[in-house]
Amino acid sequence: MRRQMDILARLKEKGVIRAHGVSCHSIGALEAAAAEPWVDVVHARINPYGASMDGPPEKVVPVLEKIHAAGKGVIGMKIIGEGRFRDDDEKRDRSVAMALGLGCVDMITVGFEKPEEVDALQELGVRFGQGYHLAMPIDLGAEAQAAAAPVEEIRGERSAQSR
């Protein structure tokens, strides 16, 4: 993945992107992200119920605090438990309030299937949004697209790691 990291670093130097980071799917990955100088921002799964997370909130939150204390941005994802709490107002509201109230989560991402779901989050104090219901995706050009690794390269790296 070094090739992709280098491409993203060049895009940051040129001002095409503001930050680069990782999406973590284990406590170990979260801890590694806190210590890795290249990482500017981390996508981390967080909600009060531990749904679709890398561990219970009491284990994940201290790692998020460490990441935030290191000056890295923390983007909370799976806030609504991968949609499990979509139709449960109490769980949805508690999940958003928890993420926004931690003090170490700088931003949250929530997937929407209906425009009404955007309205519900606005009522909870969410001020900004991005997504297909709000604005169409933009093309960053060929250099940004080159950051995507060919499947063969990813498979080769995974094979080498498992040896």
Image (spheres, helix red, strand yellow):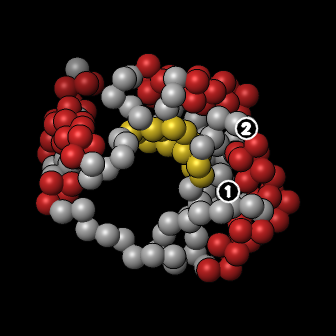
Q: Which structural element holds mark 2?
A: loop
* Residue sitting nearer the eye, 17 or 98: 17
Q: Which residue is mark 1?
A: 80
- Where in the figure is residue 161, as x and y percent of width and height? 25, 24
- Where in the figure is residue 87, as x and y percent of width and height? 76, 69
Q: Is residue 9 left or right of residue 120?
A: left
Task: Please indicate, yes or no, whether residue 92 appears anywhere in the rendered image.
Answer: yes
Amino acid type, residue under disc 2 in the picture: Leu
* Residue at the (33%, 28%) spot, across then down: 38
Q: Is residue 140 left or right of residue 63?
A: left
* Residue sitting nearer the eye, 81 or 135: 135
Task: Please indicate, yes or no, whether residue 25 appears anywhere in the rendered image.
Answer: no
Task: State the CA–CA distance, disc 2 to disc 1.
Answer: 16 Å
Rendered image quadrant of residue 117: bottom right
Q: Quadrant of the N terminus?
A: top left
- Where in the figure is residue 124, as x and y percent of width and height? 77, 62
Crowdedness near tag 2: few (<14), some (14–19) or many (≥20) residues, C-alpha within 10 Å: few
Residue at the right extreme? 90
* Residue sitting nearer the eye, 53 or 138: 138
Q: Which residue is mark 2?
A: 102
* Residue at the (68%, 61%) spot, across then down: 126
* Residue at the (67%, 30%) spot, across then down: 61
Residue 138: assigned label: none
* Residue at the (26%, 52%) spot, across then down: 16
